[in-house]
Structures are given as C-alpha cells and as structure tokens.
Image (cartoon, helix red, strand yellow):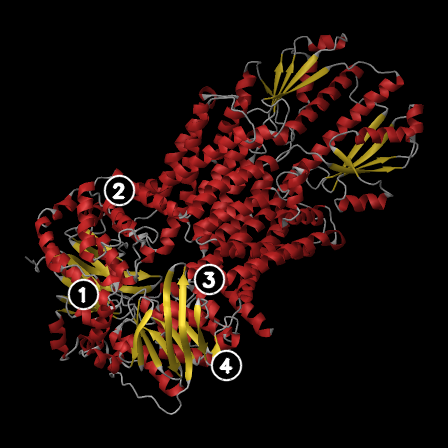
Amino acid sequence: MRRTIANIFWLGTKELRAFGHDVVLVALVIWAFSFSIVNVARSGVEDLHNASIGIIDEDRSALSLRIAGAFLPPYFNPPQWIGEHDVDALMNDGRMTFAVDIPPNFQRDLLGGRQPTIQVDVDATAMMQAGIGAGYIQQIISTEISRTLAHTDAPPASPVELAVRIAFNPNLTAGWFTGLMEIVNNVTMLAIILSGAAIIREREHGTLDHLLVMPLTPFEIAMSKIWANGLVISVAVAFALTVVVRGLLGFPIQGSVPLFLAGVAIYLFFGTAIGIFLGTVARSMPQFGLLYMLVAIPLMILSGSHTPQEAMPASLRMVLQGSPTTHFVAFAQAILCRGAGLSVVWPQFLAIGLIGGIFLGLALFRFRHATAQTAQ
Amino acid sequence: MNQHDHPIARLSNVTLTYRNKLALDSITLDIPSGCMVGLIGSDGVGKSSLLGLIAGARRIQSGQVDVLDGDMADTAHRNDVCARIAYMPQGLGKNLYPDLSVRENIEFFSRLFGLSRAERRRRIGELLESTGLAPFPDRPAKKLSGGMRQKLGLCCALIHDPDLLILDEPTTGVDPLSRRQFWDLIGRMRRQHSGMSVIIATAYMEEAERFDRLIAMDAGKILAVGSPEEFKASTRTTSLENAFAALLPDQRREQASLAIPSRDPVHREVTIRARDLTCRFGDFTAVDRVSFEIERGEIFGFLGPNGCGKTTTMKMLTGLLPATEGEAFLLGKAIDAADMNSRNRVGYMSQSFSLYMELTVQQNLSLHARLFHLPPGRARERIAELVQDFGLGRYLDELASQLPLGIRQRLSLAVAIVHEPEMLILDEPTSGVDPLARDEFWQILLDLSRNRNVTIFVSTHFMNEAARCDRIALMNDGRVLATDTPEGLIRARGVANLEAAFISYLEEAGGKQLVIPDGERIDAAAADDAPESPALSRRRQRSFNLRRMLAFTTRETLELIRDPIRLSFALLGTAFLMIIFGFGITTDVENLSFAVLDRDQSPASRTYISELRGSRYFVEKPPIADDADLEKRLRSSDVMATIEIAPGFGRDIKKGTPVSVGAWIDGAMPFRAETIRGYLQGVHSQYLVDLATGQGVAAPAAVNIETRFRYNQDFRSIYSMVPATMAMLLVLIPAILMALAIVREKELGSITNFYVTPVTRLEFLVGKQLPYIAVAFVSFLILFAMTLLLFRVPLKGSLPALLLGALLYVTTTTGYGMLISSFARTQIAALFGTAILSVIPATQFAGMLTPVSSLSGAGAVIGHLFPMTYFLRISVGTLTKGLGFADLGMDLAVLAVTIPALTLLSLLLLRKQEA
C-alpha cells in the first residue's frame, strides 16, 4: 500500500515536470483561466444585453420620442433612427435585432381611441435575444402608453401586481454566470487533453513499455497522471475562482469554495479517467485530437453551461444524466450561485464519482491491451 | 576526376551553442570534394551539429560556412544549392513517412526536387533495382526492417542525384549484412556519379577504414584530419579504433583492451527458459517456436537482421506482449505480467529510449531509484556510482532530450540497472554509442555477469560485441537458426570470423531480403544514363513550384487515406455532432418547474394558479409548505420559480384593494431567469385580461402591438441553430484536423525534409492544407445534406453563395489550425491551444447565441476577427433569411481576405531552419 502511494506520488512529479517544461502549454493554461474568463464575462455574452434596436418613426410626435427614449442600456443600445427601407438590409446583415415601427399619426389615433398598431420586427435568428427582447419591448411600449394615457409617470395601477424578485443574482448579471461556466468548461477541456495526450505521448516516445516492465501497475500509472494533472487544474480553478471571478469580476460567491473544490476534485477524477480511456483508444495524436472533439464538445455544450437543459428534448436530457459534466455544471451553480451545501449536492458528487470510477476501470482494462497493440 | 584541391565545404571559426552549452568551438575546416569524408568521434562531440550546419538544416550562429561555393547563411544561396545536397539525419528512417509505401516515399522526394514524370519513373526504377527494394515497392515504410529502411532513406536522398551527400550515422542499428549492402550501394552510386562528395558521421571504425579522409572530433573541436593510413601512422597503431583512442586527450586514453574473464562453471542454474515461444500478429508470425535456455550469470547474445523477431521475443519475456503459443520461465516462474516481485528482479532496456525527455539526467535517475524503492541513502550512493561508471557527470543537469544519442543510451542503461537486477534484458543497448563508450559499457556488463552473477540477455548488431557473449542465438525470420558459443558457430561454418559465420547462416536460410542485385548489370545499365542525369538538378530554383507543393498534398492525402479511423472520425463524427447539437442546442425553454405557496387557498387564488398550470412552459411541483421550504427548494434547484399568494388575496380582489402576487425566480442562470420572467409576465397579463372580462370591466387595449418574428415565423430555434451548428462544426473539426500538421512533424523529426529540400514555406503550408480543405468541404456537403433532409431546414437563398462561402470558410478554418500548429512546440499544446482558441470564440463570440453587435470589449474584437462570424451570416443568411450574393458580398470578401492573412502569419512563424 505504501509502495503504491509512493509510486503514484513519484510518477506524478514527473508529469508535473513535463507540464512545466512546455512553455506554450503553460501559457495557454494561464490564459484560459484568467484573461479568457474575464473576456467572456465582460463581453456581454448571453441574454439581453446591448441589443441593437432601430426606430422607424413615421409619427414624429412627443409620444414616439417618449417610446424611443424608454429603451435603455444595459438591455438596449441607444436606438437608431432608421427609415422603413433600411430594415431589411440591417437585419440581413445581423446588425440590427429589433425594429419598432411607429405608424404616422400614432399619437393622434391613440388619444382618439382609434387603437393604432405598432409593429415590432424581430430577427428570429438571434435566438438568445429574440424571445426575451420581444417580451421586453412589448412591456416597455405598453407601460409608456399607459403612462401617457394616465398623464402620470407612476406605474399604471392594476388590480393584481406581479412582484418578481430574482434570487441569488438580483440584477441577473450575466457575466457572473458565463465566467463561472467558462471555468467549468476549461476544466473539462484541460482534464481530458492533458491526461489523454500524456498517455499517447508516452506511447509515441516508447516510455510506456518501460513503465510497464517496472514494478508498477497500470493503476499506479493511471493514478499518477490523474493526481498530477488534477493538481494543475485544481490550482488553476482555485486561482480563477478567488482572484478572477470573485476579485476581478466581483461575483459574490454564495457557497463554500472548499466544497466546490472538493467537487472539482471528484470531477477531475472523471475528466482525467476519460482522457486516459480515450488515450488508449486512439492510436495516434491526430486521432486523439478528433476523438477529443467528438467527446468533449458535446459534454460541454450540452451540459447546461451554454443553453439551459430545460431547452433540450426529453430523451437527450435523460441521456445527459449519465454525463458527469452535466452534474458538474449543476453543482457549480448550486454551490457558487445558490449557496447550497453538501446536503444538496451529494447526489451529484456521488453520480460523478460513480461514472468516473467506471471510466477509470475501462481505462485500466484498455491499458495493457493498448500497449500490446503498439508492441509490434 | 577528383578535385581534392577545391573544397566542397569550407568552415571558418564556426561556433555553435545550445542553452549555454558549447557544441562547436570555433571550427575551421576544409572538406575536400569528390571523396568520402568520415567524421569520427565520441557521442556528443558535435558531429551532428556540424553536419546540420553544412546541410543548411541548422542556423549558423557565428562563423562562416561555405558549401558549394556560396555562403550558407545566405538564404538565396541555400535555396539554390539545397537541390544539390542530400541529407539523411540520424535515426532509423527519420526522414521517411511510415505510412507511405516504398514507392510513395521516393515519389514524394522526387516531386520535392521537381523531377518530371519521365525522369521520376526512370530514377525510381533505377534506385529500387540497385537497392534491392524492387520486389516490394508497395510495402509501407513502417513495415520495413531497419536495414531496408536505411536503404530506402538513401534512395530518397539520392533521387535528385546530389553533388553532396551528407549521412549522419546511417548504419547505426543496422545489422552487418544490411550494412554491407548499404556501403556497396554507396560505392555504386559514386561510380555512377563521379565527383559526388560524401560526408558521413559514423560510430563504426571498421567502416571508417574505407573512407578517403577522416576528421576526428572531440568536445566541439577538430582533433585531426587525414587518411586512415595517416591516422594509424601518426599514432603508431595498427587499427583505427586504437588510433582514434590515441588521439583523445590524456584522461580518456587509458583504454585497456577488454579482457573477458571465463565464467565460473560451478553453479549452472537455468534462469531464463523459453519453450516453443510463438507470437503472431494476425497472419504474420513474428516469432516462430523459439526455444532457448539461459543460465545464471551468462551473457546470452541475440543476433539477427532487423525485424527478425528479436525485439518481439524480448518483449514476450518481459511480459509486455503475451505469447500466442509456447511458454517462458523467468527465474523458475512462468511469466506473469502482474507479478511485481519478478519485475523488481529484472531490468529492461527497450530499443526506443526509455527515458523522459523532459527530465534531466539527475531527475531520470532519482525517479527510477524511487520507483524501485531504494532507500534514500542507498539511492544516493547508487546514483553516484552509476554517474561515475557511465561518465554522466558533466550531463547531470541537462535534459535528456538535449543529450546526444550515445549519452542517452548510456543513461538508459544506467536507469535499467539502478535497482541492481538479477537479470537484464537489453535490446540493442549500444546502437549509436561510440566505440570507447561501448567498451566501457561492456566492461560494466562483464562485471555484472562475472562478479555479481547477473544474467544478461542482449541483442546487438556489433560483431565484436557478439563475440564477447558466452553464447549466441542467431535469429532470422522469427526462427532461431543456431545457438552456440561464438567459437562454436565459427567452427561449424568453417569460416574466419563471426561476421562471416553470421552471413553464411543467413544466406543458407535464404532470407528473402538477401536478394542482392547483380552489381555488374546495374552498373552497365546506369552507365548509359550517367551523362544526362547530373543535368537535372542544375535548374535554378523558382520561388513557387506547383509540383513541389503537390508533393506535400499527395503525401498528406495518402496519410489521410491510410488512416481510415481519422478520416471517418472527421466525416462521420461531424455528422454525429450535427445530430446532437441540431436537436440538442435550442433556446426554446420549456418544462420549467414551479411550485406555489398559497396562503390564501381561496377560489380566486386557485384561479390565478390554474392560469400558470395551463401554460405549456411550466410544470408544477408539489406545493410549498412555508418560507423555509421555499428557500430550500430554490436552493436545491428543485424548482426554478415560486409563486407566493398572500392571505386575503381573494377577498382583496373582490374589494378592489390592490394586491400583489410574489414570485421568486432562480437567478443562477440569467438567460433562463429572464425567460421565466417573460413567461410569468405573459401569464400574468393573460390573467388580468381574464379577470377584467369576468368582472365585465374589460376595456379594449389602447394599442395593438404586433410582433413579427422575421425569417422564422414559428420562432423555432432549429432554423437558426442548424445553420449555426454547421458553422461551428466547420471551424472546430477542420482546425483540430490541421492543428497537428506541422507540430507533429517537428515532434517526430520528419520536419528535416522541409529544412533541407528546395521546398519553400508557402509550398509546404499550402500543400499540406489542400487535402484538409477537401475533407472539410466534403464534411460541409454532408452537413448541408443533413440540414435539408434530416432537419428539413430548406435553403431559401442562393446556393452558389453558400457553396462559395463554405469553401472560403473551410480554407480559413484549416488555415487557423495551421497557424496554431506553426507556433506550438508540442502536440499537446497544439491540441489544447486549438481547443481553447476555437471552442470559446465559436460558442461565445461568433454570434451563435448572442449577436456580435451586442458584444462589447475584447469579446467584440474577437467576434469581428473570428472567421465563423462571417460564415454564420452566410449560412443563416442563405438558409433561413433567403439572401444571396448581393447581401453577403461583404462577408464573402472578409473570408477571402482572411485566407492570405492566416497563411502569411503562419509563414512568418514557420522557420526554414532549426534554431
């Protein structure tokens, strides 16, 4: 037992040295866990932010000005005044997502009770913005019209109010979410590549044979890669979380950072195990590269870190329950955004641990087999 | 015919350093033309560096190198003369492409040198014939034996009939028979092309004997220059080996001839026993019923041509390979791959370097000491001992990757015996090691065998080493031909020495590879052609040559075809991802869970809730008990929204007192929260309308707000997601396909062909890129067909615009992968770099989910620079928006401009010489 631990430890130090030696790789990892996260968080990715809107004002009345003035940042960019014939070109280019057409004599017809029609054009191909934005625009226009009719700036009275409050992220700052998810995605990418490519490199350079004739078990070899690569990634995550997300982005982390890191450690167990598994399946680095894309990209994109799980077909959601990445995203949101404790996230931890264990078993099973293949 | 007075290469004051380590120390030297010049010296004295400089593969740091009457620091001159130089780097088949067949490898080189089809056919036929490779033109290079590989390498080097041939240890690791054939071949080539100069680095002194001139080197300096006879005369020795030893500085000279003590015949206990050991790979029998017994303390040699099954047998003994049939016992026990204890007693050194290149010598040694669990004190002693015995002292802090071949081999052996095993299995441990070091090495082996009773099972190509073994097994074609003492073998064949005995056995066995063509006939045939052939390489090199570019295209295409797994991953994998993402990535959020905390429990409150239940977006969960429950369930993500209805809700509505319904939404995922808020507000408005109607106070709305979802009336995300997914996949997959193109050649060594042949950087880049563009375009066509047929998203706009856009786009995305490949140093970095530098921009900044017009900061900049942004407009534009050339001209133009920009960047990052 002690020998096993010592072997795993010393083999792992070799992995760390190899990692530190590759300057380009180290630079890429640093970039991925710092600038890249800030970049994604600060660029206004996702939901309604800086949406481009154009106003076709054929009325040129006080009311039309008032409506146009109600579209405010951060949701909307300052509206652009456009002509009716500009809409097609602007929307075709994707330069404008919304256009509000206020017809001639709108104010007069409204006050005269003639029920005029405002047309809102939405570029339905801008999926993240179109639906939410259309709702906002309707609401903004109705509010302005009610206020005009009531001659007051107070919100119109209604028999029943709906008071919506947002838990955990009151202003719905999207950057917090995208920044966190960027960390999550980087972990997946890096864990699989580092461990899988480490196996292939040992094979391409012939050092794997050498390891296998020493008093080392495949288990020890695999575990050494898991802990060493896991350590590199955990350090990167801890840094990204405390310095970048909490410090630079000002995200008020709700839950326990150590608990989250414990979860990351369990997840890395899966990520590196699947990397090793893929490393034994692929015969060469180019094959591994493609295989990686085929496995990692769906894991990441369908994990709920890009689009909500609720938007996926039920059958796919079922399948995705088997993906630890999905559980990882779920517990990351639970712990960091909602402040959940172990009592809430343990099922996810357990699921990730179990699936990771299966993949580690598979990877070990493939290990000797794979070396026999290259031996000739 | 020889102009000895006119040097082919002239070096003055050439100095070269790697990371503060002096490799060449102000060398001044003239290399005469028209003869065979040998470079001899120990490992790591700078032979390879010197050859690299002369070949133009290495950048000159200081000093002057003139080759073929011009300055090699001058790019124009280098480009001119590289067609007249051939360079074979160190290492078996290092300049070959393992997946390509014999003929394809030669064809590739002939295209690089711009030979016409007719010339090519003639030269290839000639070379195949004269090297004895003619019977197997279609065998992949990776399936050739070492000797044949080197001959093929030579064919490739000679294809353009060079004036100067540079060979860096060409026969290292090659068996004696193949070696003899190799030198015969060189001799014939020189007769054909009189005036061809040859510069060879070698570790075999008996080979050096036949060269015209020798240059002895040590520690980056020239020791002596002269003919072999002059060497021997000046040192008053009879053999070159001794002459060389005598030339070395004092401290290294003590070279006692190796005495072989006889074995103590007392305990004769068998430690390795193989019985009918057989190994088959498919229908190929690598090892065929091999039996032998090795006694404790015996040195047992394995001799045989490359590829005869020596390595496979050794791997079976170590348990690395399972035996197909037969059995083997090690130290009295059947081999069991899982038996850790027996592994502790065996040391193994494989043919490929069993070292960690990124660790220093010291780190390699202490890592292995630890893995064999030597106590720390003992480990220190042992390492100091090994460093002393193997002369590794001055290399302790150097990375293994920086070590010369011979030193690396020494380190490998040191590592293999760090735990003082009872038994050593050594697979060609001394190939590439200089004679002196080899003797030192054998001194250690003899000491281990005679004094410590270590059993040694060793394979070798050196006859003088084989002669030192107690017994030898001769192997050929997977079978043991004979096993006996060296003297016994010589006696049995009635010949003078072991080499003759070896060749005699092999010739009797009639190995297929021994067909040596009739030299006379070849020479006669070649004589006819000789006058015209030198002319072909004299052409001035043009700056861009289509044929050279296509050489890379053809080669890359063949490699792709030879790897059907990769090709099918690329094509079918893309289709697979398209299905998953096309159906999986949507923004049509449904199935949102909510629960109610109804403190009123009145008909009015139930009416409000039923409005929510009626919405197709929401799914109700069991009611909430209290505030604590509400918080808990939001926190655990059991529900995404809660509705709280205050007591007296029904009563207040009746009275007309304004009341309020409280809603909490889980804000963890902002997009989802916004969507829920929108849906809740919609449901609420509907409730208000129903309420007003019910109370009979409904007033018609003051204004109609008519929302038109353009391009996609049903507002189903598939119409935008499918074209967007297509754009995303066509950057991710082609980029990763391409990303290893250059860095892999760097890591595996074939990049040297690019350094020393006339191919330009542009030809190299574009030539390699073309096949991947084709693959990526085919994968676009598959995706497009799926879009139309599977997802039933119709094409509303211009087909030609989409096709042109796709072609431009896949060219930019492969170019993007190429760019990453040109600056990454390792394949791992290239993979991670491509992943991170393509996945993030593709999913976040290219407009797939959020329009680029809404981005700010660095994201906006990346979005505008990333090619996918423009193709996304083209794919969504033509498929969903019904656009054509008129609307998409700008996007097409941007893509078209990006192509040369990316190529130019790669061009700037790619060096035509090793630093």
Chain under label 3? A
Per the image, the residue denoted by label 4 is B377
Q: What amino acid is found at the position of numbered circle 4 in the picture?
A: Gly
Q: What amino acid is found at the position of numbered circle 3 in the picture?
A: Thr
Q: Closer to the camera, A269 or A171?
A: A269
In the displayed structure, would residue B507 be above or below residue A344?
A: below
| Residue furthest bottom in the image | B266
Instruction: Tell me how far mark 1 sits from mark 4, CA to CA.
Output: 46 Å
Dot 3 surroundings within 10 Å: few (below 14), some, or many (20 or more)? some
| Residue furthest left in the image | B1
Secondary element at image label 2: helix
Question: Which numbered disc covers residue A371?
Answer: 3
Camera-near label (4 vs 2) is 2
Give the mark, 1 or 2, whose residue is nearer the N terminus.
1
Q: What amino acid is found at the position of numbered circle 2 in the picture?
A: Arg
Per the image, the residue denoted by label 2 is B548
In the displayed structure, would residue B173 be above or below residue A132?
A: below
Chain under label 4? B
Camera-near label (4 vs 3) is 3
Residue appearing at x 22%, y 67% in the figure: B177
Image x and y of residue A305, in percent: 63, 42
Marks 3 and 2: same chain? no
Dot 4 surroundings within 10 Å: few (below 14), some, or many (20 or more)? few
Residue appearing at x 64%, y 24% in the figure: B714
Q: Closer to the camera, A376 or B869?
A: A376
Instruction: Tell me how far mark 4 sits from mark 2, CA to CA.
Output: 60 Å
Secondary element at image label 1: strand
Total marks shown come to 4
Give yes or no for contact between labels 1 and 2 (Cβ–Cβ under 8 Å): no
Camera-near label (1 vs 4) is 1
Secondary element at image label 4: helix
The picture quadrant where one finds residue A342 is: bottom right
